[in-house]
Image (cartoon, rainbow, N blue to C red):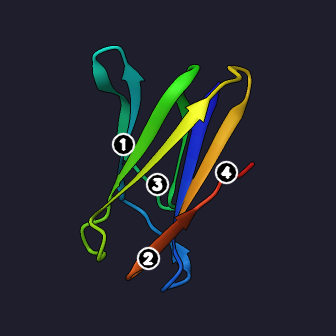
Amino acid sequence: MSLSTHVLDTTLGHPSPGVPVTLEFLGEDGWEATASGQTDPDGRISGWPTRPGRHRLRFDVPAAFFPEVTIVFDVADEEEHFHIPLLLSNYGYTTYRGS
Protein backbone atom coordinates (compact mmCIF):
# COMPACT_ATOMS: atom_id res chain seq x y z
CA MET A 1 0.00 0.00 0.00
CA SER A 2 1.13 3.51 -0.55
CA LEU A 3 0.46 7.08 0.45
CA SER A 4 0.43 10.31 -1.48
CA THR A 5 -0.22 13.89 -0.44
CA HIS A 6 -0.77 17.20 -2.21
CA VAL A 7 -0.32 20.62 -0.59
CA LEU A 8 -2.32 23.47 -2.12
CA ASP A 9 -2.20 27.14 -1.16
CA THR A 10 -5.84 28.21 -1.40
CA THR A 11 -4.96 31.87 -0.74
CA LEU A 12 -2.83 32.07 -3.88
CA GLY A 13 -4.64 29.36 -5.80
CA HIS A 14 -1.67 27.15 -6.63
CA PRO A 15 0.37 24.17 -5.37
CA SER A 16 2.91 24.61 -2.56
CA PRO A 17 6.32 23.30 -3.64
CA GLY A 18 9.16 22.68 -1.19
CA VAL A 19 7.03 21.95 1.89
CA PRO A 20 8.90 19.59 4.26
CA VAL A 21 6.74 16.58 5.16
CA THR A 22 7.43 13.66 7.51
CA LEU A 23 5.47 10.41 7.66
CA GLU A 24 5.49 8.65 11.03
CA PHE A 25 4.15 5.33 12.34
CA LEU A 26 2.97 4.72 15.90
CA GLY A 27 4.87 1.67 17.12
CA GLU A 28 5.22 0.09 20.53
CA ASP A 29 7.88 2.63 21.51
CA GLY A 30 6.05 5.71 20.22
CA TRP A 31 6.19 7.61 16.93
CA GLU A 32 8.91 6.64 14.47
CA ALA A 33 9.71 8.43 11.21
CA THR A 34 9.24 6.18 8.18
CA ALA A 35 9.69 8.70 5.34
CA SER A 36 10.44 12.37 4.82
CA GLY A 37 10.88 14.75 1.94
CA GLN A 38 9.63 17.93 0.32
CA THR A 39 6.73 18.50 -2.00
CA ASP A 40 7.66 18.65 -5.68
CA PRO A 41 6.97 21.67 -7.98
CA ASP A 42 3.34 20.52 -8.23
CA GLY A 43 3.05 20.35 -4.40
CA ARG A 44 2.99 16.54 -4.36
CA ILE A 45 4.69 13.60 -2.70
CA SER A 46 3.79 10.06 -3.69
CA GLY A 47 4.84 6.46 -3.27
CA TRP A 48 5.46 6.48 0.47
CA PRO A 49 4.91 3.06 2.06
CA THR A 50 2.37 2.45 4.80
CA ARG A 51 1.28 -0.57 6.79
CA PRO A 52 -1.72 -1.34 8.97
CA GLY A 53 -1.82 0.86 12.07
CA ARG A 54 -1.77 4.52 13.07
CA HIS A 55 0.21 7.03 11.00
CA ARG A 56 0.69 10.76 10.98
CA LEU A 57 1.83 13.29 8.42
CA ARG A 58 3.65 16.37 9.74
CA PHE A 59 3.81 19.37 7.42
CA ASP A 60 6.30 22.15 8.26
CA VAL A 61 4.67 25.41 7.08
CA PRO A 62 6.41 28.18 9.08
CA ALA A 63 5.14 31.00 6.84
CA ALA A 64 1.58 30.31 8.03
CA PHE A 65 -0.19 31.12 11.30
CA PHE A 66 -0.09 27.39 12.09
CA PRO A 67 3.63 26.58 11.64
CA GLU A 68 3.04 22.83 11.74
CA VAL A 69 0.06 20.83 10.55
CA THR A 70 -0.26 17.26 11.81
CA ILE A 71 -2.75 14.80 10.34
CA VAL A 72 -3.24 11.49 12.16
CA PHE A 73 -4.96 8.62 10.34
CA ASP A 74 -5.47 4.87 10.62
CA VAL A 75 -4.67 2.31 7.94
CA ALA A 76 -6.67 -0.92 8.10
CA ASP A 77 -6.49 -2.40 4.59
CA GLU A 78 -2.95 -2.99 3.43
CA GLU A 79 -4.05 -3.10 -0.23
CA GLU A 80 -5.51 0.42 -0.31
CA HIS A 81 -3.86 3.57 -1.61
CA PHE A 82 -4.28 6.62 0.61
CA HIS A 83 -4.23 10.18 -0.72
CA ILE A 84 -4.33 12.93 1.91
CA PRO A 85 -4.40 16.48 0.49
CA LEU A 86 -3.70 19.54 2.64
CA LEU A 87 -5.40 22.81 1.67
CA LEU A 88 -3.67 25.79 3.27
CA SER A 89 -4.62 29.42 3.72
CA ASN A 90 -3.01 32.11 5.87
CA TYR A 91 -5.12 31.35 8.95
CA GLY A 92 -6.54 27.91 8.40
CA TYR A 93 -6.25 24.53 6.77
CA THR A 94 -8.41 21.58 5.84
CA THR A 95 -7.83 18.02 4.73
CA TYR A 96 -9.79 15.03 3.54
CA ARG A 97 -9.25 11.50 2.29
CA GLY A 98 -8.78 11.84 -1.43
CA SER A 99 -8.63 9.20 -4.12
* Residue that numbered label 2 is attached to: 92
Q: Residue at x 58, y 36 (%)?
A: 3
Which quarter of the figure has residue 81? top right
* Residue that numbered label 3 is attached to: 40
Query: Would you place residue 88 above or below residue 91 in this image?
Result: above
Nearest to the observer: residue 78 or residue 18: 78
Q: Amino acid at mark 4?
A: Arg
Q: Amino acid at mark 3?
A: Asp
Tell me the CA gap for discs 4 and 2: 18 Å
Element class at badge 4: loop
Residue 88 in view (yes/no): no
Q: Are marks 3 and 1 in contact (CB under 8 Å)?
A: no
Decide: few, some or many residues near mark 3? Use Cα within 10 Å; few <14, some 14-19, many ≥20: some
* Residue that numbered label 1 is attached to: 37
Q: Residue furthest bottom?
A: 11
Element class at badge 3: loop
Q: Nearer the viewer, mark 3 or mark 2?
A: 2
Tell me the CA gap for discs 1 and 4: 20 Å
Q: Residue at x 70, y 52 (%)?
A: 98
Q: Amino acid at mark 1?
A: Gly
Tell me the CA gap for discs 3 and 2: 22 Å
In screen coordinates, is 20 left or right of 11? left
Residue 97: assigned label = 4
